[in-house]
Image: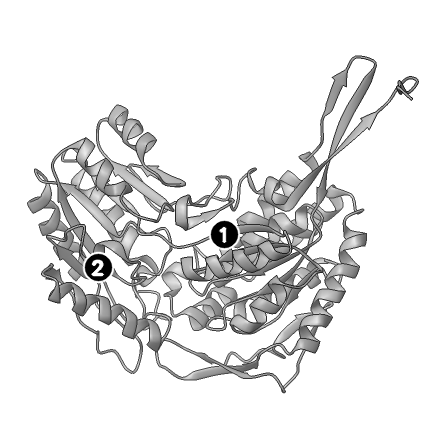
Amino acid sequence: MIAQPPASHFIDGAYVEDTSGAVIDVIYPASGEVIARLHEATPAVIDRALASAARAQTVWATTRPVDRARILRRAADLIRDRGEALARLETLDTGKPLQETRVADWPSGADALEYFAGLAPTVVGETIPLGRDFVYTLREPLGVCVGIGAWNYPSQIACWKSAPALALGNAMVFKPSEVTPLGALQLAEIFAEAGLPAGLFNVVQGRGAVGAALVTDPRVAKVSLTGSVPTGRRVAAAAAEGMRHVTMELGGKSPLIIFDDASLEDAVGAAMLGNFYSAGQVCSNGTRVFVQRGLKDRFLARLAARTTAITLGDPLDPGTQMGPLVSAAQLDKVMGYIEGAKAEGARLVTGGARAALNAGFYVQPTVFADVTDDMTLAREEVFGPVMAVLDFDTEDEVIARANATEFGLAAGVFTADLTRGHRVIGQLQAGTCWINAYNLTPVEAPFGGVKASGVGRENGHAAVQHYTQVKSVYVGMGPVDAPY
């Protein structure tokens, strides 16, 4: 099974290779086989990408927003036209089943391109009357933006970052995760075919050193990262040295609170979506499932029945509901958390072992009950199909416990009492919340976290603030009044 691209990088409208860069093997998670071999960007490749972006951006910034929009809309149409092939590539890159990649990954990316294409021509300044004089404002692009992607939703993230950047007149140099490097190259091809001028969206491959070189380059005006909290701290600190704009979408240990008046089937379904979709490798997952004591036994019984019915298997089989983890390293990490939970006294309800499917990186969907707040499983992000169920009695108690974490990415509440739902959400320290739903992230809505889970927002009109800056122009309409 081969998914070898023409070259490792896409710069200035064409594929570029430099075999002197360190090798990056792309592993198919369902079998462990190497399906592509790429090379890290050398300093010369990085310089070429940034130089072409800086050159192209100065022209792009003066292009009419409606003309930029037409190109992004054509790119969205091309993604939808090629949906099946792109879904298959995403499955090979990530190990996620076709059942997911057909509907969640590239389709969300196309939605982002379409949304920001529509938004771009509406971004305007304002006029501020001052009597005789007045001030007007302009929203201007930042310049060259760097996007650093994560491995769990590589193509969606590339679109989510490039769509507002390009729509608002910026250029982007994008570095995908070295674990899942293939989708961003396809996006670069699609942009070129849609008519995007060369240099505006460049893709360079590499590990942390390549990212560091991009983040600290003086030609870069903004950095947008999706990744872990430790990586976010390092990138934000490096960007701050040059006073660069940053958007940080980082990890979480999000609470999903289920009151005993909630719909049992809906609550169980949401908890499963918030822990097992993409084999649990979703940053906003509700991995601390707080269940009110009156519903606990029925919840766990139904959860166990539905979890054991999940179909693990070949991700290229449309009937497969859950695929492998993305890598051997992630498999080892997740199994370490499972063994740690057992050792700390959590009660294993179902799962808890590696699934023996070929040589792939499969883990059984796993549920632990009787988890307490001090257990490692309740404090650290696992990023695998491992659910922690915790008991609670009162509303005030669960709000306090839900907020007792450094993270603040997401939160959810299930209850038949909508007044209580709004009241509880209003007190939770999280940037992206749901009531009687979970993990739905339409591009129309801002997405991002608070506390250690990040700064800034992806998507929605809020993204305009993070890819533009305001220029104020004072217009004097009379003689200058000087005391000299």
Q: Is residue 12 above or below residue 136?
A: below
Q: Are marks 1 and 2 in contact (CB under 8 Å)?
A: no
Colour scheme of the picture = one colour
Query: Residue sitting at 21 percent across and 74 percent down?
Result: 354
Q: Is residue 330 above or below residue 429?
A: below
Where residue 76 sits: x, y (%)? 60, 53
Mark 2 closeness class: few <14, some 14–19, many ≥20 residues within 10 Å: some
Query: Residue sitting at 77 percent across and 27 percent down?
Result: 136
Where residue 232 sits: x, y (%)? 47, 58
**Relative to 174, 261 lies left or right:** left
Where residue 139 sits: x, y (%)? 71, 38
Residue linked to disc 1? 248
> How many numbered marks appear?
2
Location of the C terminus (image quadrant):
top right
- On residue 376, the disc is 2
- Which image quarter: residue 323? bottom left
Judged from the image, the secondary structure of the residue bearing numbered disc 2 is helix
Name the amino acid, label 1. Met
Name the amino acid, label 2. Thr
Q: Is residue 479 above or below residue 471?
A: above
Query: Residue sitting at 70 percent across and 63 percent down?
Result: 192
Q: Is residue 477 visible?
A: yes
- On residue 68, the disc is none
Q: Is residue 81 visible?
A: no
**Relative to 341, 287 lies left or right:** right
